[in-house]
Amino acid sequence: MGKVLVTGGTGYIGSHTVVELMQTGLEPVIVDNLSNSLMEVLDGICEITGKQPLFYEVDLKDVTKLKRIFQENQFESVIHFAAYKAVGESVEKPLLYYENNLVSLINLLKLMSEFRVNSLVFSSSCTVYGQPEELPVTENAPVVKAMSPYGNTKQIAEEIITDAVQAKMIEQAVLLRYFNPIGAHPSAKIGELPLNVPNNLVPFITQTAIGLREELKIFGDDYNTPDGSCIRDYINVVDLAKAHIAAVKRMKESAIPVEVFNVGTGNGVSVFEVVNAFQRVSGQDLNYSIVGRRSGDVEKVYADTNKANELLGWKAEKSLDETILSAWEWEKYIRLKDQNY
Ligand code: UDP
């Protein structure tokens, strides 16, 4: 059974991917410094799969400790999630973001090269496209200057990985450009767990509905879109997790050095549509108000998913309603279970 190193494996997307790996018969090994996740996530994974994955509480910036993990385990590939991801914070603390996100990646690539671990799946983002000229956006759209240090770390990381493959330090990489991951595992045993005030739309909605926040602020209703609010491509986190399994398989079957895939649904959905879907599936009224635009937001972006559909053999399956309901079920579960969790 192949061992797969999952960095950031107790995080939101990482934990769902760990579950999918285990259910596919692969053996994930988690490395996470718990800077933005909790150890209890491992219990959720265990409740779903019946098994506890191997877990190391290690910071990827600590190359000595990371090396020990490579010595103790023979990995067939690496899925690299671990990174800081708060856009606003990255503007305030750019060096923290560059250091954390890029030193981690460099350490990982050095060790992959030393231990001959040849394939990497990397968490990138549709933020690399900025506001695309053509929609749906394909992987061939130009990468534009990043709007934030966070976005820039994703662009630079894509380049670092591409250079490392070109130099044959590792053989292959798949760069997955995520659109907007939302929702939770259908079991409601794992999900998104913002440790601070959420920046993202759906956790803000569910926290407002459960009474943790007073109201949702909708950032702008004067965009050039049918209802005036921004349009995004909201992808179910379990569907997204499955794209990583497909990417690991893809590298076993193809010899292409670096491939880039959009991971989205292909559907553009507005903020108001998300709010309405939430009210519909939860039966709850949501307090919200409309405020000014948030700086740095693009007006609309959604994926052309043809490349992922054809080459990864992967397709988003879950509906928006089902996905938003899963986020709501998770919110209720986690608040009932333990106020401090
Ligand atoms: N949004 C909002 N209120 C919030 C959070 C987000 O109106 O409290 C909007 C935001 O302006 C954007 C969409 O919801 O149009 C998705 O935002 P999110 O931060 O979840 O993702 P991203 O900005 O990365 O696409």
Image (cartoon, rainbow, N blue to C red):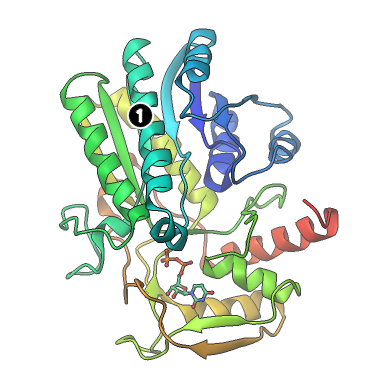
Task: Please say if 127 is above or below 307.
Answer: below
Q: Mark 1 points at which residue?
A: 120
Taking 82 as reference, is 325 left or right?
right
How far from the left and from the top, in percent, is residue 192? 61, 54
The part of the image, by quadrant, that contains residue 276 is: bottom right
Secondary structure found at label 1: strand
Residue in front for this viewpoint, 281 or 77 = 77
Q: Which amino acid does label 1 sit on?
A: Leu
Task: Please say if 15 is above or below 278.
Answer: above
The part of the image, by quadrant, that contains residue 142 is: bottom left
Task: Please say if 330 is above or below 293.
Answer: above
How far from the left and from the top, in percent, is residue 63? 45, 21
Q: Which residue is located at x 38 percent, y 52 percent?
A: 94
Taking 184 as reference, is 97 left or right?
left
How far from the left and from the top, in percent, is residue 52? 70, 27
Residue in front for this viewpoint, 244 or 103 = 103
Q: Which residue is located at x 21 percent, y 52 percent?
A: 139
Q: Which residue is located at x 32 percent, y 57 percent?
A: 126
Taking 274 as reference, is 169 left or right?
left
Residue in front for this viewpoint, 199 or 16 = 199
Q: Which residue is located at x 29 percent, y 25 percent?
A: 253
The part of the image, by quadrant, that contains residue 105 is: top left
Residue 67 in view in this figure = yes
